[in-house]
């Protein structure tokens, strides 16, 4: 068969993959706010399912290769570190390294699906996400005013829940919407973006204030500031934040040590609310253990073995990487974030890029609350990447169309 004769077959195959990915994303889009509100832990299953269904779309583009190499090398190092880790799970299903090895291709496939989806279906999926997250924001406003009456009523239908747990769970949901709202708002039709952003912003803030989630409140301050920097300095802003993020992963143990060494660390702890005071205690114990094995760390999941000083993990992503994977892991994390954020630099302002930077900074901020290997937390980061590539492609398509009209 000649190359000319084979060309239509290639186009047909490409079209079918694009259409399939588009329909998968359209099907998953309405579940994003529902799962984020009712069961954030289910985000791991949702993103993994998208990745599984869209495996034919998996590609590593030339510009993706540095990040892919870093992630693969980090995965190998994490696997090697299990040989000296004091934590030994009894079941294969509880092994973090097994889950990470499965999630890497699935999550990458989900991002590839966002990039390769049929443009019309991609637009539809983005609009559904935007409407759903705007409604999510409105629901959070109601929840804040009524002490989570909607969440409690829904739970009575299938599983009664204590009032304090219901309110805490709604507060937890603010960290989902509080993370993705910039990209979710940009996903709306241009005339609706400001209104949708307002609904998401107010909903997150009201519920976070009502249920005591300070990190969500701080995220509402940090995200717009980061977006403004990326918009005002589209080339230098992302690069500066890439350097700052790399420094965060490399220097966090030294920063905690400096505060403890030069200031009254215990006085600072005692002046903070109980949860924040406990977190500072974990950090202090973590840097002591890091000092014993600074290069190779204690091994993957070793954080679980350092109780009662550290419960499960240090509640700080950079410190957990240092503690478990040592300086090698910290360098890998710094390199990944540096490469990922640095490549967002553009010669001209981009709303999609500004929203991506906003979400990335919020993700780093919220990382002081969660263990870095938690499946749902990793999936939430992948969801940000999916929304980012979809919006960047959408924006590029609009600019191309405008250029043709001009």
Image: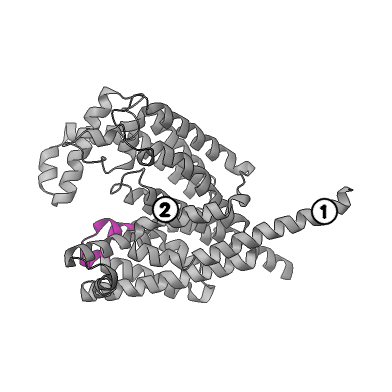
- Asked where in the image residue 246 lies, by quadrant, the reply is top left
In the image, residue 70 sits, relative to residue 211, either above or below, namely above
Magenta extent: 208-219
In the image, residue 212 sits, relative to residue 278, either above or below, namely below
The reply to whether dot 1 and dot 2 touch (C-beta < 8 Å) is no
Between the residue at mark 1 and the residue at mark 2, the CA separation in whole angstroms equals: 38 Å
The dot on residue 7 is: 1
Residue 173 picture location, percent across and down: 32, 62
Left or right: residue 146 compared with residue 364: left
Residue 27 picture location, percent across and down: 52, 66
Which residue is most to the right?
2
Which residue is most to the front?
91
Left or right: residue 254 compared with residue 183: left
**Could you tell me which secondary element the residue under label 1 belongs to?**
helix
Residue located at (45% from left, 57% from top): 46
Left or right: residue 88 compared with residue 74: left
- Asked where in the image residue 216 lies, by quadrant, the reply is bottom left
Q: Nearer the viewer, residue 230 or 276?
A: 276
**Could you tell me which secondary element the residue under label 2 belongs to?**
helix
The dot on residue 136 is: none
Residue 339 picture location, percent across and down: 51, 40
Residue on which disc 2 sits: 44
Dominant secondary structure (helix, strand or loop) of the stretch shown in magenta? helix
Residue 341 picture location, percent across and down: 49, 46
Would residue 217 be counted in the magenta stretch? yes
Q: Which quadrant of the rendered structure holds the C terminus?
A: bottom right
| Number of other residues with Cα within 10 Å of mark 1, as a class: few under 14, some 14 to 19, many 20 or more | few
Q: Nearer the viewer, residue 188 or 87?
A: 87
Residue located at (43% from left, 73% from top): 196
In the image, residue 191 sits, relative to residue 84, either above or below, namely below
């Amino acid at each position: 068969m000649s190359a000319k004769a084979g060309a239509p077959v290639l186009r047909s195959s490409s079209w079918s993959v694009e259409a399939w990915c588009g329909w998968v994303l359209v099907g998953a889009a309405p579940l994003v706010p529902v799962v984020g509100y009712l069961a954030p832990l289910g985000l791991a299953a949702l993103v993994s399912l998208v990745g599984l269904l869209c495996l034919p779309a998996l590609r590593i583009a030339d510009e993706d290769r540095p990040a892919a190499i870093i992630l693969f090398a980090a995965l190998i190092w994490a696997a090697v570190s299990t040989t000296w880790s004091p934590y030994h799970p009894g079941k294969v299903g509880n092994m973090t390294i097994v889950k990470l090895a499965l999630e890497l291709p699935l999550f990458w496939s989900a991002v590839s699906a966002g990039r390769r989806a049929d443009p019309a279906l991609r637009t539809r999926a983005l609009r559904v996400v935007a409407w759903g997250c705007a409604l999510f924001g409105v629901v959070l406003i109601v929840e804040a005013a009524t002490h989570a009456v909607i969440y409690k009523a829904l739970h009575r239908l299938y599983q009664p829940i204590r009032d304090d747990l219901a309110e805490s769970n709604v507060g937890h949901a603010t960290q989902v919407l509080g993370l993705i709202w910039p990209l979710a708002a940009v996903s709306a039709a241009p005339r609706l973006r400001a209104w949708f952003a307002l609904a998401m912003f107010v909903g997150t803030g009201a519920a976070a204030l009502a249920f005591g989630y300070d990190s969500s409140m701080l995220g509402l301050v940090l995200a717009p500031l980061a977006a403004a920097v990326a918009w005002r300095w589209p080339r230098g802003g992302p690069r500066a934040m890439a350097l700052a993020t790399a420094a965060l992963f490399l220097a966090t143990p030294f920063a905690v040590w400096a505060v403890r060494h030069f200031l009254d660390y215990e006085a600072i702890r005692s002046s903070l609310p109980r949860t924040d005071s406990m977190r500072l205690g974990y950090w202090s114990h973590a840097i002591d253990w890091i000092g014993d094995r600074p290069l190779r760390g204690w091994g993957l999941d070793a954080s679980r073995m350092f109780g009662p000083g550290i419960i499960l993990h240090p509640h700080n992503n950079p410190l957990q990487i240092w503690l478990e994977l040592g300086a090698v892991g910290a360098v890998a994390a710094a390199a990944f974030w540096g490469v990922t954020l640095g490549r967002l630099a553009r010669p001209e302002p981009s709303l999609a890029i500004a929203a991506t930077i906003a979400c990335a900074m919020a993700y780093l901020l919220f990382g002081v609350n969660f263990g870095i290997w938690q499946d749902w937390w990793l999936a939430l980061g992948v969801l940000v990447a999916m929304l980012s590539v979809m919006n960047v492609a959408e924006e590029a398509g609009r600019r191309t169309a405008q250029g043709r009209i001009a």
